[in-house]
Amino acid sequence: MSSSGDGENLDVVAFMKLALEQAKIAFDGLEVPVGCVIVMEGKVIACGRNRTNETRNATRHAEMEAIDVLLDQWKKLKLSKAEVSEMFSKCVLYVTCEPCIMCAAALSFLGIKEVYYGCANDKFGGCGSILSLHTTSCEGAGGKSYKCTGGIMAEEAVSLFRNFYELGNPNAPKPHRQPVQQL
């Protein structure tokens, strides 16, 4: 990222736009619209989107998808655990919604450098909304604290959520609201 304040802000917005593109792909696939990108040294090295419905696996959040992409790449390069840890310490995550408790804890254990997110996650947020797992709370269990900044393009992220839930979640086991019939 750029070292100047304005350049850094432009980079943050540009990377968040890429995360929003991933969220739109999730939305189009009838998934809860969350997307992310992982950046190292100013370059996107992985992206992810929610795939919980597609995979029938509740752990397949956008962050976990992107993490797995990196772990697969680094495994092929035969990086040691120490080298993988060093790589994660240089990574910045941009995600459209505050990481949930599971993802926030995973990011702490991996030693991610920094997280930027769009909207808050008032039900499951692990970066301040419910728990603050990005701070020292995971350090006793082997995690590392990381810097976290929210509210980046939050309106766009919330708009995707509203559109998704207004249509109803056709993949939910017991929808709270019936899906709206499209003409």
Image (tube, rainbow, N blue to C red):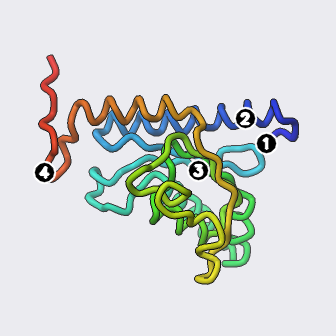
Badge 4 or badge 1: first in the primary sequence: 1
Q: Secondary structure at mark 1?
A: loop
Residue 126 screen position, x and y as percent: 50, 60
Q: Residue furthest top?
A: 183
Amino acid type, label 2 = Asp
Residue 77 vs residue 7, the one in the foreground = 7
Which residue is identified by label 3?
A: 46
Q: CA distance from mark 3 to mark 2?
A: 16 Å
Which residue is identified by label 4?
A: 174
Amino acid type, label 1 = Met
Which residue is identified by label 1?
A: 1
Amino acid type, label 3 = Ala
Q: CA distance from mark 4 to mark 1?
A: 44 Å
Which residue is identified by label 2?
A: 11
Report crowding for label 4: few under 14, some 14 to 19, many 20 or more residues within 10 A (C-alpha).
Answer: few
Q: Are marks 1 and 2 in contact (CB under 8 Å)?
A: yes
